[in-house]
Image: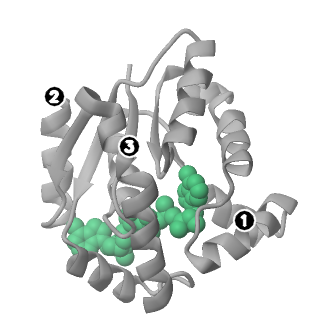
Amino acid sequence: MVRLVLVGPPGAGKGTQAAVLSEQLAVPHISTGDLFRANIGNSTPLGQKAQSFMDAGELVPDEVTNEMVRERLAESDAQQGFLLDGYPRNTAQADVLADILAENGTELGAVLSFDVPEEELVRRMLARGRSDDTEDVIRRRLAVYRSETEPLLQHYGEKVITIDAVGSVEEITARALDALGA
Ligand code: B4P
């Protein structure tokens, strides 16, 4: 069963690849960034909590994020596997995810790490132009990635599969599927 996490700096193309890979692997694509943006769009209490953190390039507090993911993973479509995009983003979230999975008698299969040089990340995000893609906020998100998220690669150790995520979308999908043996 596919239980996969995508890790990478902001703008690395996690969301882009997750959309394709979830179809190819026939598992739901669960993106915490997309879930937050949908809540913001619908002006829910959760969206109101998340917005100021996202606008500043900071992580949304763990208790908000973890609860949202716990509820999403309890839905029926996630019982046959999942592809998590942008979660966990720090080791505390990774511990909660391990607990959620252990409660269901399962564990993560693999962690796909996206490797992209910083200047390419900044170029992609400035071209995308989302509301949190201004130069100052991008720099903050990159700093938060280095301090909070990158340590996950050490934390997950042998589960990590690193792919070169520079190239066309199709090339990167092929590398990811190849690395996963799919
Ligand atoms: P996310 O929504 O996760 O976004 P991201 O890291 O910026 O982007 P991603 O890597 O998915 O890149 P994409 O495919 O879009 O996070 C946004 C915010 O939400 C965070 O800053 C945080 O505040 C909050 N958040 C989310 N999860 C959280 C958590 N677990 N805990 C706390 N807070 C959380 O690609 C980027 C651009 O590159 C696109 O324009 C794309 O078209 C382009 N692109 C993709 N592949 C390309 C390629 N091969 N070549 C050229 N361009 C490419």
Asked which colour scheme the image uses, the reply is one colour
Circle 1 Cα neighbour tier, 10 Å, few/some/many (<14 / 14–19 / ≥20): many
Helix, strand or loop at disc 3?
A: helix
Query: In the image as oriented, which residue stretches furthest toward the right?
Result: 45
Q: Crowding near pointer 3: few (<14 within 10 Å), some, many (20+)? A: many
Query: Looking at the rendering, in which quadrant would you find the N terminus?
Result: top left
Give me the disc on residue 152.
3
Depth order, front residue of 142/173: 142
Per the image, the residue denoted by label 1 is: 50
N-terminal-most mark, 2 or 3:
3
| Residue 175 visible in the snapshot | yes
How far separated are the C-alphas under marks 2 and 1? 36 Å
> Would you name the residue on which mark 2 appears?
181
Instruction: Identify the secondary structure beneath mark 1.
Output: helix
Instruction: Name the amino acid, label 2.
Output: Gly
Between discs 2 and 1, the one toward the N terminus: 1
Image point (16%, 49%), residue name: 163
The residue sitting at 59% across, 62% down in the picture is: 59
Is residue 107 depicted above or below 66 in this figure?
Answer: above
Q: Residue at x 38, y 34 (%)?
A: 4
Amino acid beneath label 3: Leu
Task: Assign the C terminus to one quadrant of the image.
Answer: top left
